[in-house]
Image: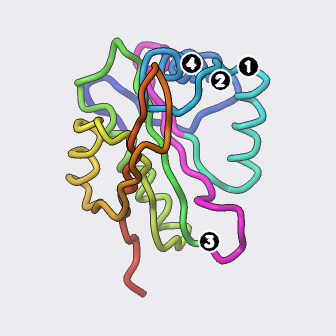
Amino acid sequence: MTDQSFIIRDATVDDLPGILEIYNHAIINTTAVYSEEPHTLDMRLTWYNDRISNGFPVFVAEINGTIAGFGTFAHFRAWPCYRYTVEHSVYVHINHRGKGLSKLLIRPLIDRAREMKLHAMIAGIDGENQVSYHLHQSFGFIEVAHFKEVGFKFGRWLDLKFMELILSLD
């Protein structure tokens, strides 16, 4: 799948340094990740292996051999009765934001979840992130929860919104 010179493909272990760079930038500079400490390459390898061993996708957006973004999903909660619900995440390198890349990464995640016969997909979005909120609305996600002041980062309390897309109506 290509658009605007971006190639969306399954990630490999070789992509982990690029994924790590994007993720750590989000940790250090944004409220997209409610974590404060940068991850290591070993942590990303464990994360990647967990996704792959559970049959979950990790997609990357590549342009000219560089990782510009990534998207994935995994269990929403660890208990068995949540097995048909996943939570996804999409991150884009700062140099490639605003180019529609998130849309290119979300679509194959939704498609793969439907292929896997999953029922619901959840997005956890910082309460102030209107860009992500509207992006998810454009895919049919609806807000189902707004948790007030559940995170604390950069010296302030953060709200977390959950948006949900029902993948099947069976």
- Nearer to us: label 2 or label 3: 3
Earlier in the chain: of badge 3 and badge 1, it is 1
Mark 4 — residue? 24
Q: Position of residue 2 (x, y in %)?
A: 33, 34
Mark 2 is surrounded, within 10 Å at the Cα level, by few (under 14), some (14 to 19) or many (20 or more) other residues, namely some
At horizontal 70% and vertical 28% (from top left) the residue drawn is 44
Amino acid type of the residue tagged 1 in the rendering: Leu
Mark 1 vs mark 4, CA separation in Å: 10 Å
User: Viewed as shown, does residue 14 lie left or right of 6?
Assistant: right
Q: Which residues are magenta?
A: 59-81
Q: Secondary structure at mark 2?
A: helix
Q: CA distance from mark 3 to mark 1?
A: 29 Å
The crowding category of the residue bearing disc 3, from other C-alpha atoms within 10 Å (few below 14, some 14 to 19, many at least 20), is few
Is 61 contained in the magenta span? yes
Residue 35 placement (x, y as % from top left): 58, 29
- Determine which quarter of the picture holds residue 129: top left
Residue 16, label in figure: 2
Tell me how far mark 1 sits from mark 2, CA to CA.
7 Å
Q: Are marks 3 and 4 in contact (CB under 8 Å)?
A: no
**What residue would you read off at disc 1?**
41
Most common secondary structure along the magenta stretch: strand
Give the Cα distance between marks 2 and 4: 12 Å
In magenta stretch: residue 128: no
Which residue in the protein does label 3 denote?
82
Residue 128 is situated, as x and y percent measured from the top left of the image, at 28, 36
